[in-house]
Image: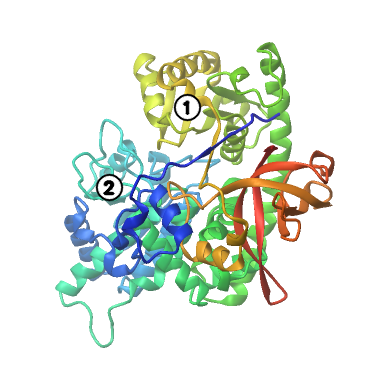
Amino acid sequence: MKARKTLRRRDVPEGAEALLPRVPAVLRRVYAARGVREPSELTLALSGLLPPSGLQGIGPLAAVLADAVQAGQSILVVGDFDADGATSTALVLRALRRLGATRVDYLVPNRFEYGYGLTPEIVAVAATRAPDLILTVDNGVTSVAGVDAARALGIRVVVTDHHLPGACLPKADAMINPNLPGDTFASKALAGVGVAFYAMAALRGELRARGWFTADRPEPNLAELLDLVALGTVADVVPLDRNNRALVAQGLARIRSGRAAPGILSLFAVAGRDPRQAVASDLGFAIGPRLNAAGRLDDMSLGIECLLTDDPRRAREWAERLDELNRERREIETDMQARALEQLGPLLAARGWSEGQVSSVPEALVLFDADWHPGVIGILAGRLKERLHRPVIVLAQEGEEGEGLLRGSARSIPGLHLRDALEVVDARHPGLILRFGGHAMAAGLTLHREALESFTRCFTEVVRESVEEADLQGVLLSDGELAAEDITLELAQQLREGGPWGQHFPEPLFDGVFEVAECRAIGHGRHQRLVLTPPGEPERRFEAVLFNHREDELPVGRFWRVAYRLDVNVFRGSSRCQLMLEHVEAA
């Protein structure tokens, strides 16, 4: 059950390629299609980062933190249970200790007990550690009740977050978030770990101004923590604007040079990836999921400890445990996907579904199963969104069965701002949603079980009003065709080094017609390794890999239009170019 995608070539503004004269021709075209107009936009040095002073409220925040550090007060970092939250927590702990803080600890809510953010319940747990100050990372902007609860106990609160705020802001002692009303910071796309990095940079500047650093307490180089920033930024799938690209590029450089945290290097090892060849997709598809597995199935403290330790042996032990959890997560996800598709079958059949027919799919999908694992619903929502090109909300039971609460995770398509859509539902039907929050493309929510049918109807209605028909068509954007002589290892390496690629700055994808000269099954028959030749040029043979297709679906001797990425395949010390196929259709 999968909706077909339409292959469409990206527009390249006329004359845009001429603005980048020193860039190789194919890369010129790729960059121009992504809005790059100046060579300076491709400069990803740290000197080009936006200054911390541009963040609204960062001066007061640095002052509050500096007071606590200098007074030797107890600082408790409260993080989130995903990869962004884990890297944010590890970064802040490492930074505070290097800056001279002597009493620093962390607390991450277990998603199955406390849910997301600085809730009054997690404040009660935090209070047992008697902190003088709570510092939130990757959460807090919607924690109005939690901040009030902390202040009532005499605990100061400093909030660093990047999520969209609600109608009412918490009364924290200080707060930074590029998405606060009135904040003019040019990069609204910072991940939680990016905001945390800026907070620590501002704190260092404040302590420097106070004469805090001495020969015995030297000023730390916070750039040494950019491996954590890169991992959290890519794993959180935030848009890679120029500022984020610079942060990720610098973090990747540290990883490639072997100067990353032992935990990150160990995660590369258990994932079978070479950190010396690290690219952003490794962080997004290999390292991030293993880190996220801790928060999804167990306790994110496992992931944080992996990122905090400086002992390579302990780091490897943590990484192996995370790898085990990730394998368990995959098994759970596979079962959940099968049950979701079973659940969708009658719905689509009633609408005249035929394989690949996009128009047969409802405007929005809301699915619930009492046996689904609440830690994996976000992944399932994402998978279904990719398959069917619809906004998807997947819900699981929260707490004990008798409580009657459902926790949902939502993923959206371009054209629908998910959090705004939930806000419209909430405004029209107050009380229907108990809690919600998130971004344009991802959100979370909580409902009463008996409200599920009403919510499904209302959410679908809002989606129907908000999207155009074109938004509901699955489109795969290509950077055009490559001449056969351009498909080389040299170009593959140029493209690899031309990143980092990611959300809103996608990795180059090309299309063309090829004949299948050879095809053999790999991966227990689920994937294919092929040899492709361009029409009329049988002497040119290109290795290719296609995932999730059977061998009989691509008969040898037939011509196909394919969309592909150029990849550098390193095997036994030698490199060669191969095509990673993303889409296949009859030529």
Instruction: Indicate how the structure is coloured in the image.
Output: rainbow
- Mark number for residue 52? none
Q: Secondary structure at mark 1?
A: helix
Position of 332 with respect to 279 (left or right) is right
* Residue ID for mark 1: 471
> Residue 149 at x, y = what percent?
31, 41
Taking the view exactly as shown, the residue that stands out farthest to the front is 536
Position of 553 with respect to 441 (left or right) is right
Q: Secondary structure at mark 2?
A: loop
Q: Quadrant of the N terminus?
A: top right
Query: Could one spot residue 500 in this view of the protein?
Result: no
Query: Could one spot residue 291 in this view of the protein?
Result: yes
* Residue ID for mark 2: 178
Q: Residue at x 55, y 15 (%)?
A: 450
> Residue 287 at x, y = what percent?
58, 59
Could you say which is closer to the camera, residue 187 or residue 575? 575
Q: Residue at x 77, y 53 (%)?
A: 530
> Residue 362 at x, y = what percent?
57, 18
> How many discs appear?
2
Q: Bin the neighbour count of mark 1 within 10 Å (Cα to Cα): few under 14, some 14-19, many 20 and up.
A: some
Q: Which residue type does callout 2 highlight?
A: Pro
> Residue 253 at x, y = what percent?
46, 71
Observer-side mark, 2 or 1, equals 1
As measured in the structure, the alpha-carbon distance from the residue carrying label 2 to the one carrying label 1 is 28 Å
Between discs 2 and 1, the one toward the N terminus: 2
Taking the view exactly as shown, the residue that stands out farthest to the bottom is 215
Q: Quadrant of the C terminus?
A: top right
